[in-house]
């Protein structure tokens, strides 16, 4: 599966981040001005939307790369959504998900392979 998000494992849980590598092959979405995220405890499904990011240019749905339970939500993004742009790997993460099926993780691409995939998709179009 190729996700429109970047993901970082933290123990047995996953942090979901805004798509950094997409910006290498697609127009930059612009400064993020609003973020809609799920509540803690909500079930998320692989490939289905769990929230939205609004920039000065567009609103984008965020699809979850794995199925599981949201165990933490980055509430800093409510007050400071621009953290997604300025600190995506540190303060701008969105949610932490406890996978319902650890085998979902086997279908994910790491950052370098995702960047390669995006470049190949861009070249094909």
Image (tube, rainbow, N blue to C red):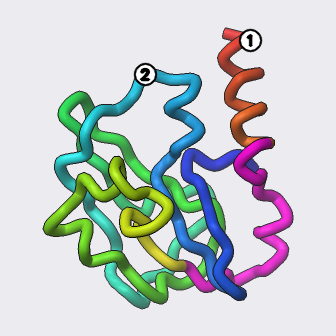
Given residues 107 and 44, the one toward you in this image is: 107
Numbered disc in front, either 2 or 1: 2
Q: Position of residue 97 (x, y in %)?
A: 56, 79
Q: Residue at x 55, y 61 (%)?
A: 64
Q: Label 1 crowding class (10 Å Cα cut-off): few <14, some 14-19, many 20+?
A: few
Q: Residue at x 32, y 81 (%)?
A: 39
Find out whether residue 101 is within the magenta segment: yes
Given residues 50 and 86, the one toward you in this image is: 86
Q: Which mark is residue 2?
A: none
Q: Residue at x 50, y 80 (%)?
A: 43
Q: Which mark is residue 124?
A: 1
Quadrant of residue 36 within the rendered picture? bottom left
Which residue, given by chain and number where applicable, does mark 2 sit on? 27
**Quarter in which the C terminus is drawn:** top right
The magenta stretch spans which residues? 97-112
108 horizontally vs 58: left or right = right
112 horizontally vs 19: left or right = right
Q: Position of residue 91 (x, y in %)?
A: 38, 68
Find out whether residue 44 is within the magenta segment: no
Q: Position of residue 51 (x, y in %)?
A: 36, 60
């Amino acid at each position: 599966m190729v996700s429109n998000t970047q993901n970082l494992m933290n123990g047995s849980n996953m942090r979901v981040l805004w798509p950094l590598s997409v910006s290498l092959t697609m127009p930059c979405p612009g400064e993020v001005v609003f973020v809609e995220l799920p509540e803690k405890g909500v079930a998320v499904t692989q490939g289905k939307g769990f929230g939205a990011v609004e920039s000065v240019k567009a609103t984008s749905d965020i699809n979850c790369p794995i199925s599981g339970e949201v165990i933490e939500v980055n509430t800093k993004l409510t007050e400071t959504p621009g953290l997604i742009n300025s600190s995506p790997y540190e303060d701008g993460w969105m949610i932490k998900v406890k996978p319902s099926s650890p085998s979902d993780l086997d279908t994910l691409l790491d950052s370098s392979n995702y960047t390669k995939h995006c470049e190949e998709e861009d070249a094909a179009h």
